[in-house]
Image (tube, rainbow, N blue to C red):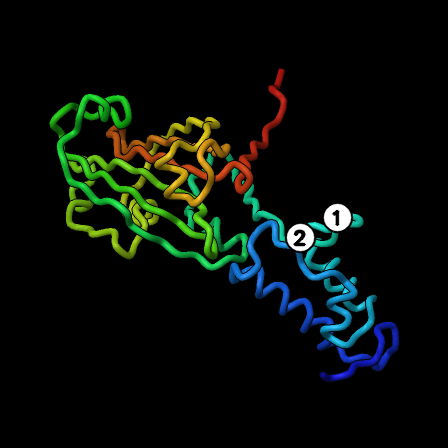
């Protein structure tokens, strides 16, 4: 094992602190150490890296400031559940949300079904029964865990070219934003417990609290798409900023 001088002396290599910081960060971001994982105690890391406890403490403190770990007195340090805050009235690209967390992104298409709209679709998308629609279900990953489930309905009268797109590699949200200018959107936000199907798709326990965002978008008064985004409740937060009314 390499030996290093104690932190606090002018001659200690900076690379030691960076090495500890990088090793722990990489294990977290790769998913090797998942949320809730207890990081080795300071004295264990001190032995592992052959350094002072002060050096280890400095690295852990930086990871805590970055929001990657939570330090609990007398219990140790634990990997935090990544939490993204997004504005309620904005339409976000899910890949960009995951990138903002510093986690590797992956997309998976689970269902693609071109069909005629039903009476239920009239409520979701304001299209008449019998109108052509494209039904999609996708999973978005942040590292190993499922970050979000996307269930989407696209009006093929509004976006006929969607019928020719496989969406095997490209997420429908990104595809639509790049091709169809939207003029209005409506968000509905609610909390719900994961049913059996959702729990299985997300790898969580049935009944786990989830945050569900349902959004309709229009282009020049023509309904374009309805999407339901389901997040594990402890991984996402919505933020609204507003000012007091004038007068």
Which secondary structure, mark 1? Answer: strand
Between the residue at mark 2 and the residue at mark 1, the CA separation in whole angstroms equals: 8 Å
Residue 68 in view, yes or no: no
Of the 4 image quadrants, the one containing the N terminus is bottom right
Q: Quadrant of residue 62?
A: bottom right
Q: Residues within 10 Å of mark 1 (few under 14, many from 20)?
A: few
**In terms of sequence position, does the residue under pointer 2 or pointer 1 come before the other?**
1
Residue 35, placed above or below residue 33: above
Whole-percent x, y for residue 32 in the image: 54, 62
Label 1: which residue?
Answer: 72
Which residue is drawn at the image coordinates 63% and 69% (left, top)?
23
Q: Which mark is residue 111?
A: none
Q: Are marks 2 and 1 in contact (CB under 8 Å)?
A: yes
Which secondary structure, mark 2? Answer: strand
Which residue is drawn at the image coordinates 48% and 52% (left, top)?
98
Q: Residues within 10 Å of mark 2 (few under 14, many from 20)?
A: many
Instruction: Pick out the residue farthest to the top.
Output: 247
Whole-percent x, y for residue 120 in the image: 23, 23
Which residue is drawn at the image coordinates 66% and 52% (left, top)?
78
Instruction: Pick out the residue farthest to the right.
Output: 9
Task: Between residue 91 and residue 231, name the one nearer to us.
Answer: 231
Q: Quadrant of residue 77?
A: bottom right
Horizontal side, residue 75 vs residue 117: left or right: right
Q: Quadrant of residue 40?
A: bottom right
Label 2: which residue?
Answer: 78
Task: Between residue 161 and residue 49, name the one nearer to us.
Answer: 49
Horizontal side, residue 150 vs residue 35: left or right: left
């Amino acid at each position: 094992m390499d030996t290093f001088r104690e932190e606090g002396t002018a001659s200690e290599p900076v690379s030691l602190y960076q090495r500890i910081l990088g090793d722990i960060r990489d294990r977290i971001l790769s998913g090797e150490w998942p949320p809730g994982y207890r990081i080795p105690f300071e004295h264990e890391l001190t032995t592992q890296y052959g350094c002072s406890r002060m050096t280890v403490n400095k690295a852990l403190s930086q990871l805590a400031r970055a929001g990657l770990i939570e330090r609990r007195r007398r219990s140790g340090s634990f990997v935090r559940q990544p939490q993204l805050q997004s504005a309620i009235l904005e339409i976000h690209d899910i890949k960009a949300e995951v990138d903002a967390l510093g986690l590797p992104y992956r997309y998976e298409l689970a269902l693609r079904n071109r069909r005629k709209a039903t009476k239920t679709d009239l409520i979701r998308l304001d299209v008449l029964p019998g109108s052509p629609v494209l039904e999609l279900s996708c999973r978005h990953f942040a590292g190993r865990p499922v970050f979000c489930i996307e269930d989407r309905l696209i009006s093929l009268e509004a976006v006929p070219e969607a019928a020719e797109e496989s969406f095997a590699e490209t997420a429908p949200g990104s595809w639509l934003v790049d091709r169809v200018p939207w003029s209005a959107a409506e968000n509905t936000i609610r909390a719900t417990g994961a049913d059996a199907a959702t729990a299985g798709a997300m790898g969580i326990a049935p009944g786990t609290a989830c945050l569900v965002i349902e959004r309709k978008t229009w282009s020049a008064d023509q309904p374009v798409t309805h999407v339901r985004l389901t997040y594990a409740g402890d991984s996402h937060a919505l933020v609204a900023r507003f000012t007091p009314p004038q007068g």
